[in-house]
Image (cartoon, rainbow, N blue to C red):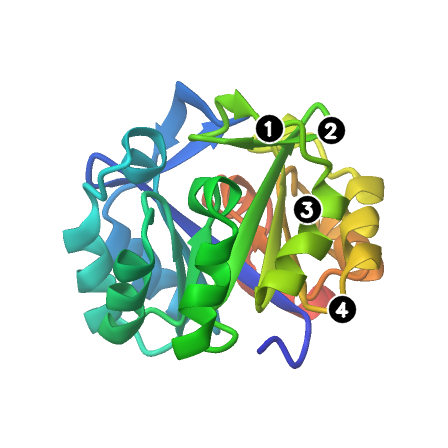
Amino acid sequence: MFPEFEIIPAVDMQDGQVVQLVGGERGTGRTYGDPVEAAERWVDAGAETLHLVDLDGAFEGDRENAPAVEAILDAVDVDVQLGGGIRTAHDACSLLELGVDRVILGTAAVENPAIVGAISEDFPGSVMVSLDAKDGEVVVSGWTEGTGLDPAEAAARYEDEGAGTILFTDVDVEGQLEGIRREPVEAVVDAVDIPVVASGGVSTLEDVRALKDAGAAAVVVGTALYEGRFTLEEAMESV
């Protein structure tokens, strides 16, 4: 898993379309077409992992974009990590059996930390715990509810529970194309020994390099790629 620093394209889905939100706020996103076509485009450009998020699942709890996810799994032959609306160990294990390589748990892990170990027992290393931070605290339910949890402390806790990876999203800069904040990423990286994947705010190749320097094992990039700020090939060559 992530033997070298990776740039992971995001395929966030809402109502069957690729969508990139600004700051996680519903109604702020732009659409970028069919999810399967986007996935194939990124794989053709050299992606070794895809980051899929069912935004309807994240907000409503129901995985409305399940057909698109299954179509992507059929269409590509790279690692796939999936989040959004995965609420039970049964749901997670079913997705892993379907061919998803890593399940991303946010709300479910906060509400029931033991779910991480329950899934990891049968699928070691398959759980990526999503810690989305807004104003310095972990938020859940589509970034709408605060938890009072410190991201770095939470990361260490989930490592102990059996998480294979941490996904850290800086919601305050997500989707704004105004740059990353290195310090929060470094704090999470320093708190754990498992890989940390960073997300949020990437707008330039310098941002990509800064996250690598901060110790992230990979970076998820969405809006910057879809808006053509740089290509996936340029990002891969830059690190």
Check contact, mark 2 vs mark 3: CB within 8 A.
no
The alpha-carbon separation of the residues under discs 4 and 3 comes to 13 Å
- Element carrying mark 1: loop
Q: Nearer the viewer, mark 2 or mark 3?
A: 3
Residue at numbered disc 4: 193
Q: Nearer the viewer, mark 4 or mark 3?
A: 3
Would you call the spot at circle 4 few (<14 residues within 10 Å), some (14-19), or many (20 or more)? Answer: few
Residue at numbered disc 1: 147
The alpha-carbon separation of the residues under discs 2 and 4 comes to 21 Å
Mark 3 residue type? Ala
Check contact, mark 2 vs mark 1: CB within 8 A.
no
Residue 178 falls in image quadrant? top right
Mark 2 residue type? Gly
- Element carrying mark 3: helix
Task: Give the percent coordinates (x, y) of residue 225.
Answer: 51, 48
Residue 136's disc is 2
Task: Give the percent coordinates (x, y) of residue 198.
Answer: 65, 52
Residue 139's disc is none
Say how many tags the image has: 4
